[in-house]
């Protein structure tokens, strides 16, 4: 087939154009560069959180232990009488060279010398002392050097029939939640006995 010179030139242009289009199509249809996952970028830019070292509880570490036997010295003194009421204040102080400790609740109290044995009845308050009104929960008292715990023992100096009561010259005292029993010398004339919780 005979083609003029212009026909060859036209064919060549068509072939070159098709080749160029094919090359562009290959570049346009190729896969785009994959983007780095957002999670990977975040991990690279944001450092992982550091775990803080666990520390012991300050409250637990600094908690004061309950008082143990022989850790407290128990003393007593007679309170001023009120009407027919008689009272004794018990004091629980730290013994020498002992650390602070806590005490709570009711002491055990029995009468000693002077008459028949009376066991103190536990009551939150009475005429001579005890807990504040409307508060029957015994506090936890921390006994420190120079800061003892105290409890009041009281009774009536007149019997139910108007009779006089024995004069006791000692009390047998056991600290709360303890088997540490001491005999303290004091005086109280009473026909019945009550003891109130320790307070600061």
Image: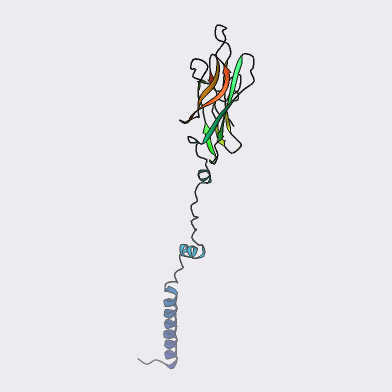
Residue 151, given in percent of the width and then of the height, sits at: 57, 27
Q: Is residue 28 above or below residue 193?
A: below
Foreground pick, 131 / 15:
131
Residue occupying the far top of the picture = 161
Specify whether 156 is left or right of 116.
right
Residue occupying the far left of the picture = 1
Residue 87, given in percent of the width and then of the height, sits at: 59, 20
Residue 83, given in percent of the width and then of the height, sits at: 64, 14
Task: Name the residue at 43% across, 88% down.
Answer: 12
Q: Mark yes or no: residue 125 visible.
A: no
Q: Is residue 1 above or below residue 152?
A: below
Instruction: Count how many numbered circles sit on residues in the image.
Output: 0
**In the rendered image, which quarter is residue 27 located in?**
bottom left
Residue 31, given in percent of the width and then of the height, sits at: 42, 72
Foreground pick, 23 / 168:
168
Q: Mark yes or no: residue 16 visible.
A: yes
Foreground pick, 195 / 89:
89
Task: Name the residue at 45% across, 74% down.
Answer: 28
Foreground pick, 146 / 170:
170
């Amino acid at each position: 087939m005979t083609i003029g010179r212009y026909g060859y030139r036209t064919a060549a242009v068509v072939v070159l154009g098709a080749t160029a289009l094919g090359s562009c199509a290959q570049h346009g249809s190729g896969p785009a560069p994959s983007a780095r996952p957002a999670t990977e970028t975040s991990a690279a830019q944001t450092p992982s959180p550091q775990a803080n070292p666990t520390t012991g509880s300050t409250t637990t570490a600094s908690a004061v232990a309950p008082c143990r036997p022989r850790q407290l010295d128990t003393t007593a003194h007679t309170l001023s009488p009120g009407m027919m009421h008689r009272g004794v204040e018990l004091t629980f102080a730290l013994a020498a060279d002992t650390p602070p400790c806590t005490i709570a609740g009711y002491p055990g109290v029995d009468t000693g010398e002077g008459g028949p044995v009376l066991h103190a009845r536990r009551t939150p308050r009475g005429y001579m002392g005890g807990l504040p009104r409307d508060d029957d929960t015994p506090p936890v008292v921390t006994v420190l050097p120079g800061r003892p715990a105290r409890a009041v023992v009281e009774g009536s100096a007149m019997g139910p029939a108007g009779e006089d009561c024995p004069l006791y010259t000692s009390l047998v005292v056991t600290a709360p939640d303890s088997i540490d029993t001491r005999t303290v010398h004091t005086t109280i004339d009473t026909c019945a006995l009550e003891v109130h919780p320790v307070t600061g």
